[in-house]
Amino acid sequence: MNQSDTEDQEDSQTKQHPVNRRRFLGGVGAMAGLAAVGFIPLTEIVKGESPPAHTSTARSQPRQWAFVIDLRRCDGCKKCTEDCQKVHSLPKDHEWIKVYETTDEDGVKHFMPRLCMHCENPPCLKVCPVAATFKNEEGVVLVDQNRCIGCRLCMAACPYEARYFNYADPPKPAEPFDNPMPEFPVPQQKGTVGKCILCVHNTSMGKLPACVEACAMNALFIADLNSDVMTNAGGETYKLSRYLSENDAYRLKEELNTSPRVWYIAGHGQDLEF
Amino acid sequence: MTARALSRTEIREAAQRPMMAPGKTWWLIVLGLSALVLWAAVAYAYQVMNGLGVTGLGQRVTWGFYIANLVFFIGISYGGAMTSAILRLTGAPWRAPLTRMAEATAVAALLVGAAFPIIDLGRPDRFLNVILHGQVGSPVVWDVVAISTYLAASLIFLLLPLIPDAAVCRDARPERGLRSRIYRLLSLGWEGTPEQHRVLRRSMTIIAILIIPLAVSVHSVLAWLFGVTVRPGWNSTIFAPYFVLGAMFSGVGAVILVLAAFRKAYHLEAYITTKHFTYLAYILVVLASGYLYFMVSEYLTEGYKMHEDTGRLLELLMLGRLAPFFWLFIFGGLLAPIALIAVPFTRTIPGITLAALAVVLGMWLKRFLIVVPGLAEPLLPSSLIIYYPSWVEVAITLGAAAAIPLMLMVFFRFFPVLSIYEMEEAELEHVSAHAAGGA
Amino acid sequence: MAVGNLIRTAAVLVVAGAMLWLAGAPVVASATPTVLTALPPAEQEGGKAVTIAARLTDGSTNRPLGSLNVQFFVMTDVFGPRLMSVGQAITDTTGRAAISYKPSWEGDTKVVARFAGSAQFAATETTFQFVAVGPVPVHQDASFGLEPIRAWAPAVVVVLVLGVWATLIAVVSQTVLGLRVRIPEGAPVSVPIAGTHLQPASEDIGDGAS
């Protein structure tokens, strides 16, 4: 059950109980007792009535997807890039989520993943001559590769270098998919531009984006601005607005007024600016 | 000094000299140019079949030779606006022998330049989407609209004074044939009556007035293709006037080259004299100084602050990998032409032509130095990307450069190389001014 | 003798285990049982934040426990049921820990308050529900600015472009129509370009080549 999962994690995060002989002696009984204590609150009802089934009020609102990256945790393994490329059948030079490496003056490497910022004021959308780049109702910026003429002005305009042009045919998808659409542009079309789609094909079915799922360090969080929730592959879930303000979250190139939807939690004291 | 009077017959004969049966040299040159154009066509076909991966472009430097060529060739077309329109409106009579060549160069350069956005597209088969799904906020749409409007205006501006000239050609060829039919069609029944003169003069004045803001709009819009982004070197507020001035500069240089070539080839020394070259050279110097001023303004304000991205770009251009090209442009493409023209010893037709050649080649280099370094400089922590063009891009560039003289040579086989109408108009005005004021 | 020892040891173990089981804590035997009592929020003003609180007391003596950390979670269903951490607070002298929580959706909200336990006190948690009252603000995209100008500018540009094209077409048609001159019968086919009143007597146009 989710609850015991979170409970175990809470245990590991809070003060560790001193392990000693007495705990061993009462081991099994202790476990049984704990379980009993754990179950009681669930059935303990304040008002004396059984809780109604939790209504999906959050789902009745539309989503407004966003992303949070905890730079304290990223270790540069690039599993996010790999998995994204595998799921969307991308060539090696298309890194929809790209992990940048910087080295500080002590020679320590720091990693910064960057995906499409899904800006609220996207420069790429403004300059597209044929409106092939558009924003869906969940705030995700998508590309219609059936309309893109490949002029690449969007790539010149993106301040985050987040878009990639298909100079050649991409590798064949592992499972043949013959209906490429903006929400799942697989396979990519030669001569058009592609970029991170925040895995809307996953999120629309209640699954996490590929990179969020792949991150072993649980550094990537998918967030919903409407229900104010952020969560990651490990199940850690926080109230988005509170977490961002408590952790001094920042966005890249804030001064450009693109209003990006990807927040970073700074780690290691590295420079925030490049 | 006053040259001796030019009779009408002399003017007409000289203007139609290239229309006579061409000699061996003509065929050799045309064949050579056609070969280059053909090689470019083959390269483009190869690109269409295999995709843009055959170029040297990448994920960072995503625009290269093609976009530099776009800006360059459209810029070349400004010679027409400059000499024909501006000089016409300012009433400079000496421009008369130059207008036809300038306007024809403008149209040829525009046709070549307008091809480059399509050559650069990843999906040229979807070009019509720009019209079907065009977005008013996109600089690419602005480009398409501006270039097509300017092309239409330039064509009209070329064709209007061609009407009386076509009448001359029509009358010179009593035999029936396709050529006579075309001349008759083009001459629109021109008979030289005062009424027709009035109509034509008025139309030309309107187009001359209209073509100047149109020309300004075209290169401004091209500049905004870069100016609306945040890339270093592109994120500049003076990009539009910078580009317009650069276009006029390279355009006048190109006109000088065309004049020198046709003058030599068809012995038009009596009509295109040292004075024409000298006046054009002075205009070139003024434009060069203006361009230098814009560059100083740009680099001084950016260099004073050395903001991260822009600071790195300036280092790259002035002291880094691209320094040889940058300083070659400054000294060879700006300062040397100014010197060549300023010094009386070199202010000769060969000297001026050499200066114009330096200007034209230098401006191509400058366009390249605007497009590529702005993309090569990273916006997020990573390294500089080096861009090398592939044979496809080089072939298409050379083919485009060859296509302009090729089109001109073929055009002047069928139409007078000097604007008979405007030359006679200028002569008459001069005569009537003399008669009225008494020399 | 050995058997007796064995039985005695086993009995001690069983009793000890039972006592530990009765203590019910995975910790040092003296962990005190605790109870968290939920303090659900009062009437909520539509869309505003509420205070969710819980009181931590000693399970056996009912005295309040202060200076202990209580965490609060709300159940969400984004990507399945997940317990969302919404804050934590330290209990005051009355054992009450409270945080401010701004609901982001209307309707049933399930809150879990949890005390993770310490060396002395056993972990405990409680769940309660309240109904969040709307209207809850929906996320608005950041405004870009200059909205009125951005609304009108494209129309102005389109009008200008159409005006230019209209002028070009008008000039061309006027020229073509205006040049169609009726030539009277018998007139010479070719007339010199120069207008008649300006035509000089001789073939030469005059002196001065420019």
Image (tube, rainbow, N blue to C red):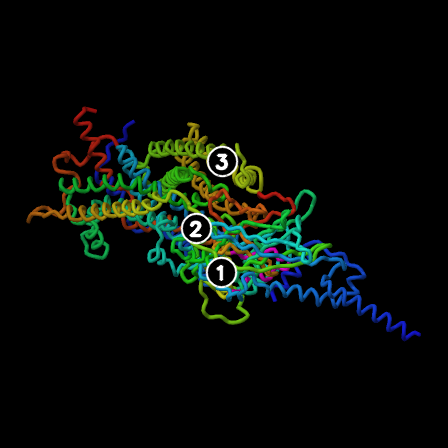
- Residue type at the position of mark 3: Ile
Provide the secondary structure element on which disc 3 rests: helix
Image height of B289 relative to A273, above or below: above
Viewer-nearest residue: A226 or A81: A226
Residue denoted by label 1:
C108
Between the residue at mark 1 and the residue at mark 3, the CA separation in whole angstroms equals 72 Å
Q: Nearer the viewer, residue B317 or B259?
A: B317
Figure quadrant of residue B106: top left
- Rendering coords of residue A132 (x, y %): 41, 57
Residue drawn 63% across the image and 63% down it: A5
- Using a 10 Å C-alpha cutoff, classify the residue at mark 3 as few (fewer than 14 neighbours), some (14 to 19) or many (20 or more): some
Q: Which residue is mark 2?
A: C140
Q: Residues within 10 Å of mark 1 (few under 14, many from 20)?
A: many
Please state which of residues B3 and C58 is positioned toward the viewer in this rendering. Answer: C58
Query: Magenta segment range?
Result: A206-223
Q: Residue B236: name its quadrant.
A: top left
Q: Position of residue B122 (x, y in %)?
A: 44, 58
Q: Chain of mark 2?
A: C
Chain under numbered label 1: C
Is label 3 or label 2 in front?
Answer: 2
The residue that mark 3 highlights is B330
Q: Residues within 10 Å of mark 2 (few under 14, many from 20)?
A: few
Depicted A69 relative to depicted A255: above or below: below
- Marks 1, 2: nearer the viewer: 1
Tell me if residue B217 is in the magenta stretch.
no
Relative height, residue B153 to residue A232 (above, below):
above
Which residue is at the front of the view, C23 or A96?
C23
